Image (cartoon, rainbow, N blue to C red):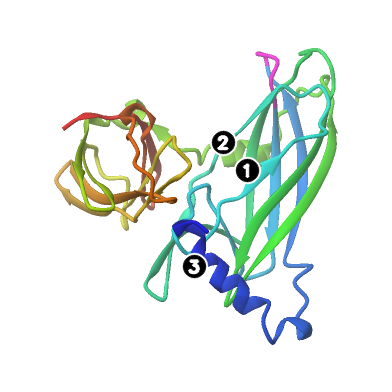
Amino acid sequence: MSLKTTLFSALVAMALGSNAVAQNFDDIVDASLITGWRQADGSHMAGIRLKLKNGWHTYWRAPGDAGIPPTFDMVGSRNFKAAQIIWPRPEVYEQNGLRSIVYHDQVILPLQIMPKSKGGDITVNAKIDIGVCKEICVPQTLRISAVLPAADKKRDGRIVASLAERAYTGKEAGAKNVRCQITPTADGILLTTTLSLPTVGRREAMVIEAANSLLWIAEPQMRRSGNTLSATTDIQHVEGAPFMLNRSGIRITVLGENKAVEITGCTGG
């Protein structure tokens, strides 16, 4: 079991323990697919709608140690080549001293699909695995399906609103001088990140991801001085193996109350 999932598994075990017989978790979340519209480039913009019971939350793609990232399986879809989720800005949620990156109550995840045949309808059959939490955490497996007609051109306001909450690119936000310094440690490496970025609002937080999914990255300890952000974080291989860190595959996301900024890659510090 990886370092990332140990805590979440413990919380799930609590949910499925002695009280599991008396509780029904089947109606915590409802999933549906908003069919959306066909775009000028031939791709189709749809939306995955997750509606949770009041007070429950689910997780962003990099949820923190107290959560589990959602997974999406599109096997069985027809006229399907590739898909990308365009993540709207999530919330930073603190509970019992642990930080999670979440969505409360409801979220629409814009889903951009590239069909094999641009002029044909797309049939989506998707399986979604997520974790949902309130006082306890439980895993949920959801299935959604829909036909996305090629003839539909009208933009859906619900998806448009979620697209407006996407992360700014580093260039759009004015990020500059993004550097990463790597220092070996006994268990892995210490990554020190510095960049110039205007404030993104109150309660700023940083998330660092790596292209290698087998790397566990601790919550960054971030500081701001004017327009300069700096952060340190520990990185380990979940199997204890040696590893190389590719700076071009590092993704830095800065979250705030006003916006999110996503920066890909950094230079040596």
- Residue at the image point whose x is 59% and y is 75% from the top: 136
Amino acid under disc 1: Leu
Majority secondary structure of magenta residues: loop
Along the viewing direction, whichever of 17 and 129 lies nearer the viewer: 17
Quadrant assignment for the C terminus: top left
Q: Name the spot of residue 45 as percent of width and height, x first.
A: 68, 29
- Distance, label 3 to label 1, CA atoms, is 26 Å
- Distance, label 1 to label 2, CA atoms, is 7 Å
Nearer the observer: mark 3 or 1; the answer is 3
- Residue at the image point whose x is 64% and y is 77% from the top: 15
Secondary structure beneath dot 3 equals helix
**Is residue 137 a member of the stretch shown in magenta?**
no
**Contact (CB < 8 A) between labels 1 and 2?**
yes
Sequence-earlier tag: 3 or 1: 3
- Residue at the image point whose x is 31% and y is 56% from the top: 202
Note whether 207 is above or below 92 in the view shown.
Answer: above
Amino acid under disc 2: Ile
For this orientation, the residue located farthest to the front is 241
Amino acid under disc 3: Leu
Around disc 1, counting alpha carbons within 10 Å, would you say few (fewer than 14), some (14 to 19), or many (20 or more)? many
Left or right relative to 88: residue 184: left
Circle 1 residue: 109
Q: Name the spot of residue 255 as percent of width and height, x first.
A: 37, 48
Sequence-earlier tag: 2 or 3: 3
Along the viewing direction, whichever of 182 and 202 lies nearer the viewer: 182
Circle 3 residue: 7
Sequence-earlier tag: 1 or 2: 2
Circle 2 residue: 86
Secondary structure beneath dot 2 equals loop
Q: Which residues are magenta?
A: 40-44
Around disc 2, counting alpha carbons within 10 Å, would you say few (fewer than 14), some (14 to 19), or many (20 or more)? some
